[in-house]
Image (tube, rainbow, N blue to C red):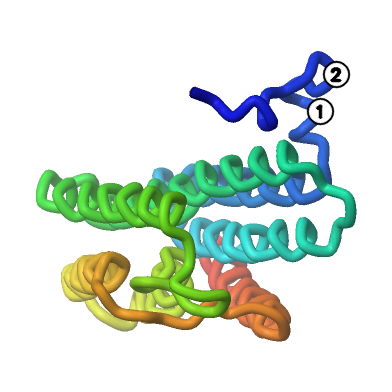
Amino acid sequence: MKNPQLQPSRQNGMLSFATELPNICSLAGLLSALLGIYFAILGIFPAAIIGMLWAVVFDWGDGIIARQMKGRTDKQGAFGAQLDSLIDIVSFGVLPAVILMSYGDFSPWFLGGAFVILAVGVIRLSYFNVFGLVDKTTYMGLALDNNVLILALVFLLDGVLSKTGFSILIYVLSMSTAALNVAPIRTPKFTGKWFYVLIMYAVVLTAIYGWILWSKF
């Protein structure tokens, strides 16, 4: 039975929740992920990586904004949490899976790896939605956003290694991080000043990948 306290009133339509600032931030992350998917399919990987990086920034930002807002109701918090979780599977599941398949020229050999990325993503997010954090600053397993932050850095080797060698590298990397996502290990939840570190990381890599794009096109 649904919790009556979380039932929307007639005054609370679906779009009224979507217009709240934390949820606008979440949707900006969804747009970044969509752009990443689009460019990954086209094979423009520097642009895809930029979209992926900013999907992480907006994912962190929505929680920070929500925690700073006073007077949010249980309904607003529950809606925001669900929205964030659903967008996470697009940003940190679908997008890296598409990048892997696209870099492998959509070969059937890469389909299995893409499925593992997606399956691990939904398993991890389902687990987190039920059990939450181990404590206020600790996750069980590696958080999904760490996968794409590592992938964004490693992708700088694209062009340094042969296409075959690099495709093997990102395949192995994706499977390794997927294993860590569901491993019974405790990892830190980066909060507070780490958000500024993330922004700087995203800005620096965006500049690098932007320069790569400019030099190619």
Q: Residue at x 76, y 33 (%)?
A: 17
Q: Nearer the viewer, residue 170 or 74?
A: 74
| Residue 93 pos. (x, y %) | 38, 51
Amino acid marked by disc 2: Gln
Say if 10 sits above or below 110 in the image: above
- Residue 94 seen in this snapshot: yes
Amino acid marked by disc 1: Ser
| Residue 77 pos. (x, y %) | 70, 46
Q: Are marks 2 and 1 in contact (CB under 8 Å)?
A: yes
Quick one: which residue is furthest to the top in this view?
Answer: 10
Q: Residue at x 63, y 44 (%)?
A: 31
Q: Which residue is mark 1?
A: 16
Q: Residues within 10 Å of mark 1 (few under 14, many from 20)?
A: few
Q: Residue at x 88, y 50 (%)?
A: 71
Q: Is residue 125 left or right of residue 101?
A: right
Comes first in the chain, label 2 or label 1 = 2
* Secondary structure under the numbered disc 1 in the rendered image: helix
Residue 11 shows which numbered tag? 2
- Residue 166 seen in this snapshot: no
Number of marks in the image? 2
Say if 202 sits above or below 102 in the image: below
Say if 197 sits above or below 18 in the image: below
* Secondary structure under the numbered disc 2 in the rendered image: loop
Q: Is residue 45 left or right of residue 212?
A: left
Q: Is residue 102 left or right of residue 72?
A: left
